[in-house]
Amino acid sequence: MVMNWSAVCLLALALCGSFSDAQWPNYQKPSPAQPPRQKPSQPGRQEPTKQMPKDPQQSKQTFEAPLTWTYPEDPKPEPQPEVPFELRHPVPAATVAVECRESLAHVEVKKDMFGINQFINPADLTLGNCPVVAEDSSAQVLIYESELHNCQSVLTTTEESLIYSFTLNYNPMPIGDSPVVRTSKAAVIVECHYPRKHNVSSLPLDPLWIPFSTVKVAEEFLYFTLKLMTADWMYERPSYQYFLGDTVNIEATVMQYFHVPLRVYVDSCVATLSPEMNSSPRYAFIENNGCLVDSRITGSRSQFMARSAQNKLQFQLEAFRFQGADSGVLFITCNLRASSAAHAVDSDHRACSYVNLGWREATGVDSACGSCESSSFGPAVVTSVASPGVSSSGGSWTSGGGSSTGSHGGRKVRDVSESAVFEWEGVVTLGPIPIGEKVIS
């Protein structure tokens, strides 16, 4: 009985197992050695992964060709050529003559008393305390006459003769409103020995100083220079010595290096007895942005020359001395300015001279000189020039060059109307320049 129940139980268990396999036909029993399967991830979804920071990678930049640019060096002074120059000392001018008559002395003096093509003012010359009595306009001669005992004459007795001595006193007054004179004081002694004559004058004193010039560099590798030039403008003048009546040729230059083409201007210039431009006495012969007023005030032959190059500006100054100053040495200090050569010449960028009773610009744009004239100048001074049949207020004038428009970039900017002007400035001092006196025989 027990055995039968055991067989029945075993059969029941077998049937149950068959029913279970039939309900799950795809079920497979995992083998003991096979690891458990992972659940498949859903399509399109990725689990985030944590990124570890990495060290930044550095690399050295290389060029296909080596760099050849170098920082520009300061300019070295150019070797000075052998200049065919010889300092010409003035020859004593034979401009005073005396005729010793029976009871009076007749003295004749040329109006070009110093032989420098510069007529003197008759009111500045007296025979003792006696003024001029007549003037020969055709021969340009002043005539003085005096009794032997008049006009502060001095009588000297020698073994050979009686000597009546007269003194021609020349005391020049300043020209116009300027503090300068272009002839120095002079005293010429005239003696009557019947009929011997003798004229005396002091000799010029030449300073022993060594001349020097200074050059100040502006920004952006621009160098401004002032040079004394020879009469033909070909070479730098080896000597700084001048005499009254000489013409001083001065050339202003800007060395532009890596810039667009530049045009140089001389805005102002002052003459002093020392290198300090604000010392006294001082004479501003160029002012108001390029107006050379010396010829307007004194009637001299000073003028700007026609431009030979945009980066050069040449001008002539008639030699002068300060009245009452014992020293005949001058220092000239100028404010130079350079701007783009493409910018037009205007009232702020000009080089104007007073020639033949009118203002003229070095490039021919005379309209830019309209503001040079000032009521403070007073009436125009006309200085006669000792040329045969010629009486004028200045030298010859040659116009040339031209003007253009436009502007280019630079360091300093000034707003002019609707365009921008890029400019560079520098201050240059030239000297000492000894100005000697003329000798009268």
Image (cartoon, rainbow, N blue to C red):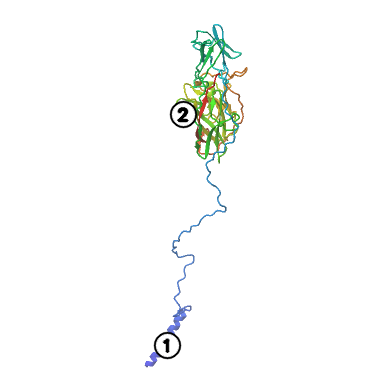
Q: Position of residue 289 (x, y in %)?
A: 52, 29
Which amino acid type corresponds to the residue marked 2 in the rendered image?
Ser
The residue where tag 2 is placed is: 274
Q: In the current view of this chain or complex, which residue is farthest to the left?
A: 2
- Which corner quadrant holds the C terminus? top right
Q: Nearer the viewer, mark 2 or mark 1?
A: 2
In the rendered image, the quadrant that contains the N terminus is bottom left
Residue that extends furthest to the top in the rendered view of this protein: 103
Q: Is label 2 in contact with label 1 (beta carbons under 8 Å)?
A: no
Res 409 label: none
Q: Nearer the viewer, residue 350 or 174?
A: 174
x and y, in percent, of residue 47 in the image: 45, 65
Residue 207 screen position, x and y as percent: 50, 27
Q: In this view, does 280 lie to the left or right of 317?
A: left
Q: Distance between the residues labelled 2 and 1?
A: 141 Å
Q: In this view, does 73 lie above or below 401?
A: below
Does residue 6 appear anywhere in the picture? Answer: yes
Q: Is disc 2 surrounded by few (<14), some (14 to 19) or many (20+) residues within 10 Å?
A: some
Q: Quadrant of residue 112?
A: top right
Numbered disc 1: secondary structure: helix
- Bin the neighbour count of mark 1 within 10 Å (Cα to Cα): few under 14, some 14-19, many 20 and up: few
Label located before the other in sequence (2 or 1) = 1
Residue 126 vs residue 409, the one in the foreground: 126
Up-down relation of residue 110 to residue 273 (above or below): above
Determine the secondary structure under disc 2. loop
- Picture coordinates of residue 380, whole percent (x, y): 54, 19
The three-letter amino acid code for the residue at tag 1 is: Leu
Do we see residue 420 in this rendering? no
Q: Name the residue under label 1.
A: 11
Residue at the extreme right of the image, as rendered: 389
